[in-house]
Image: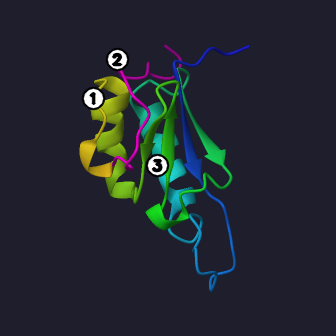
């Protein structure tokens, strides 16, 4: 069984386009998830950090919602443009991206860091 240092859950819940709460899928959730997976693989963390689909995370008013476990750090209004910063600051550096944090976060101590290294060349 694989052992992951972190799981990054990205809401890709889908509602009808005219639903008053909106839906993360229509706001770019799939693209955010795909960008996370691609960037993590590119920097050699694809086997250590898992970017997963999530159904509704009940933060519909917060745009695309992303939550990082085990720390329980919740991000809102996440776009593809935010992915590199979340990875470099939080996933690798252990410092959550303050501008994207949802209010009422669980209390956190120091967050662990993960060593980032380039993925080995194929066939190496």
Q: Position of residue 96 (x, y in %)?
A: 31, 35
Q: Range of the magenta residues?
A: 101-124
Q: What element does badge 1 sit on?
A: loop
Tell me, yes or no, whether the highlighted magenta stretch contains residue 123: yes
Q: What element does badge 3 sit on?
A: helix
Q: Residues within 10 Å of mark 2 (few under 14, many from 20)?
A: some
Q: Is residue 1 above or below residue 46?
A: above
CA–CA distance between discs 2 and 3? 21 Å
The residue at 51%/58% (across/down) is: 31
The residue at 61%/51% (across/down) is: 57
Q: Earlier in the sequence, mark 1 or mark 3?
A: 3
User: Label 1, on which residue?
Assistant: 95
CA–CA distance between discs 2 and 1? 8 Å
Mark 2 near mark 3, Cβ–Cβ under 8 Å? no
Say left or right for 105 vs 31. left
Say left or right for 60 vs 112. right
User: Label 2, on which residue?
Assistant: 113
User: Label 3, on which residue?
Assistant: 35
Kindly report which numbered mark, 2 or 1, lies closer to the viewer in this rendering: 1
């Amino acid at each position: 069984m694989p052992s992951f240092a972190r799981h990054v859950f990205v809401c890709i819940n889908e509602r009808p386009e005219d639903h008053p709460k909106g839906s993360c899928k229509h706001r770019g959730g799939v693209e955010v998830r795909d960008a996370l997976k691609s960037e993590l693989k590119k920097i050699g963390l694809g086997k250590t950090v898992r970017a997963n689909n999530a159904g509704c995370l009940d933060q519909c008013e917060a745009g695309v919602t992303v939550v990082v476990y085990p720390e329980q750090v919740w991000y809102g209004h996440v776009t593809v443009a935010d992915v590199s910063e979340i990875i470099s600051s939080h996933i690798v550096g252990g410092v959550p991206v303050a501008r994207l944090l949802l209010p009422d976060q669980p209390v956190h101590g120091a967050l662990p860091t993960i060593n980032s290294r380039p993925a080995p060349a194929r066939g190496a």
